Image (cartoon, grey):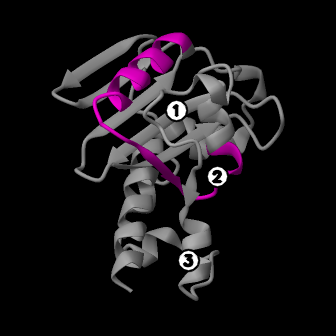
Amino acid sequence: MKIFLDTEFTGLHQNTTLISIGCISDNNKTFYAEFNDYDKSQVDDWIKDNVISNLLFSEDNYFIKEGIDLQMKSSTVNVATQLKNWLESFDQVEIWSDCLSYDWILFNNLYGHAFNIPKNVYYIPFDISTYFKIKGIDPDISREEFANERNSNEKHNALWDARIIKKCYDKLERI
C-alpha cells in the first residue's frame, strides 16, 4: 500500500517541530493530525499566515474516527500511537512524499528513530520530486497545476497536500 505523506512544521531548521501530518492511502483512506504541543516560539509570520491559518481544529484535543479515516488534534505521543495503529491496518506500506528532507525525518522522530517506525513500513521512502525528474518534468512544477487542482486556499494543510501528492503520483504513473 502506498501512503502519501505530508507534514507541516515550525520552520526549515534542525529543531523544527511538527504542527500537522496528513496521509492518504492508495485506496483513499486518510489520517490527519494536528499537534497541540509544537514549539509555538518557532512560529513566524509566514507559518502563521500559511500553515496555522489552514489548521482544522481550534480545541486542544479533538478526535474523529470513521472506519479507517481518522482526524485528531493531540500531543505528539498520542498522534504517534494513533498513526502507528492506522498504518498497521495495512499489510505493507511504502511512504511517498513530495520532498522527503523534512517529512521523513519528522516521521521517524515521532517514534524516536528509524528502528522504531511501524514494522510494516518499508524503511526506504520515495518522493515525487525525483519521480518528476525521472519523467522529464521540472521538479519545481506547481503540484496543484499538475494535478489540475485550482483550490490553492488549502495549500499547506497537510492532508490537502498529501492528496495533491497522490494526484501527482497517479498522473505521473499514466505518463
- Helix, strand or loop at label 1? It is strand
Residue at 65% over, 34% down:
106
Where does residue 21 sit, x and y in percent of width and height? 49, 35
Residue at 30% over, 39% down:
30
Residue type (three-letter) at the residue carrying disc 3: Phe
* Residue that numbered label 1 is attached to: 20
Q: Residues within 10 Å of mark 3 (few under 14, many from 20)?
A: some
Q: Nearer the viewer, residue 159 or 174?
A: 174
**Magenta span:** 77-103
> Which comes sooner in the sequence, label 2 or label 1?
1
Residue type (three-letter) at the residue carrying disc 1: Ser
* Residue that numbered label 3 is attached to: 132
Q: Which of 14 and 121 is in front in this view?
A: 121
Q: Which of 67 and 13 is in front in this view?
A: 67
Where does residue 56 sit, x and y in percent of width and height? 39, 32
Residue 69 quadrant: top left
* Residue 84 on the magenta span: yes
